Amino acid sequence: MEKSNETTMIYFIITGISESPLLQAPIFLLVLLLYLVTLGGNMIIVLLVCLDHHLHTPMYYFLCHLSALDVCCSTVTLHRILFTFVTSERTISYSTCIAHMYFFGSFICDELLFLTAMSYDRYVAICNPLRYTQVINWTVCFLLSIFCWILGFLETIPFIVLLSSVTCYKSKIINHFFCDTVQVFKLSCSDTSIFEIVLITEGLVLLCLLPFILKCTSYVFIIGTIMKIRSRVGRRKAFYTCSSHLTVVILLYATLSYQYLRPVSTDDLDYSKLFSLFNTAALPILNPLIYSFRNKDVKSAFKRQVKYFNHLPLDRVHVRD
C-alpha cells in the first residue's frame, strides 16, 4: 500500500449501527430501553443478594458477580451509541478506544470464567450434595471469584500489546458501534496474521475451549446423576436448576464464536454488528429474567424487601437482611 494511504492514528470515527438519519432516533430509543432494563434488572439482583440473607449462598454469590459484569459490559459498549446521539460526536481518541477494547474484552473473559465456576457449583450441588457445604464454602467462593476477575483482565493484555504495536492504519473509520478489536485490526496497514494466530490460540484454547471442556465435563456428570434419580419430579427439578445456566452458555459461546473465531478478512459487518448488539444488549437481560426472576427464592426475597421498606419508618436508616 502506498505511504499516502497510511494514517498515523490519533483518533477514530465510529459509524454506529446505521448511518441513516431516519434510523438514529429509533436506534437510540431501543438501545436506551435495553440498557435501562439491563441496568435495572441486574442492579436489583445485586441489591437483593446483598440485602437478603436467604440469598447468601454460593449460587447467588456468583450470580451477583455475573450481574455486575453484565452491567459493566453493556455500559462499555452501549454508552457510545447514546453518547453519539446526544452529542452528535462520532470521534473517539486512540487511547480511549484502546481502553474500551481492553475493558470489554476483560469483562467478556470474566463472564466466561464465572460461568465455568457456576457449572462447577452446580456439579457439586447435584452430584455430591452431602459434601456441598464442605467443597463450596465461602473461602472457595472468594478465591474462585478473585481468580476469575484477575485472569479475565490478564487474558486481554496480549491483544492490547499487539494493538499498541500497530503504527499506521488504512482509515480512521471504524464500521461498528464501539471500538471492536477485530474491526480495528482490519484497519491496520501491517500484516495481521500474528493477531489472528493469537486470537485463535489464546481466544480458542484458553478462553473458549478449555472453559467449555470444563463446563461440558461438569454437565456430563450432572446429566448422568440426574438420570439416576427415580422420581420424575426430582429429575425435573434438577434439570430446571441447570437449564438457565446452560442456555446462557450456549448463546454466549455461539455469538462470541461467530464474532471472533473466524478469519478477520471475512466481510459481513452488518451481521457482525447485529451479533455484537445481541451480545451486549440482549444477553445481559437474560441474567435477571432467566436466572433470577423466575426463581422462587429471588421472588420471595424481592417481596420481603418490598414489604420491609414499605413498613420502614422515615427516621430509620439502617438496612436489615
Image (cartoon, helix red, strand yellow):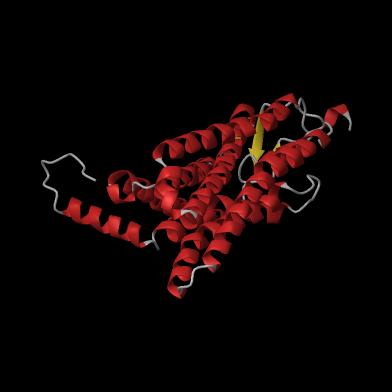
Residue 238, position in %: x, y?
A: 47, 64
Task: Name the residue nearer the viewer: 271 or 316.
Answer: 316
Q: Residue at x 12, y 44 (%)?
A: 314
Task: Name the residue nearer the viewer: 105 or 33.
Answer: 105
Q: Residue at x 81, y 33 (%)?
A: 194
Task: Name the residue nearer the viewer: 120 or 316.
Answer: 120
Q: Residue at x 48, y 53 (%)?
A: 128
Would you say 27 lies left or right of 263 here? left
Residue 142, position in %: x, y?
A: 44, 36
Q: Is residue 200 visible?
A: yes
Would you say 188 lies left or right of 81 here? right
Quarter holding the N terminus?
top right
Q: Residue at x 46, y 74 (%)?
A: 232
Task: Name the residue nearer the viewer: 19 or 239.
Answer: 239
Most distant residue in the bottom direction: 232
Residue 217, position in %: x, y?
A: 62, 53
Most distant residue in the right direction: 2
Residue 118 sits above or below residue 225 on the image = above
Would you say 82 lies left or right of 21 here? left
Would you say 11 lies left or right of 48 here? right
How many marks overall?
Answer: 0
Q: Residue 251 falls in which quadrant of the image?
A: bottom right
Q: Is residue 251 visible?
A: no
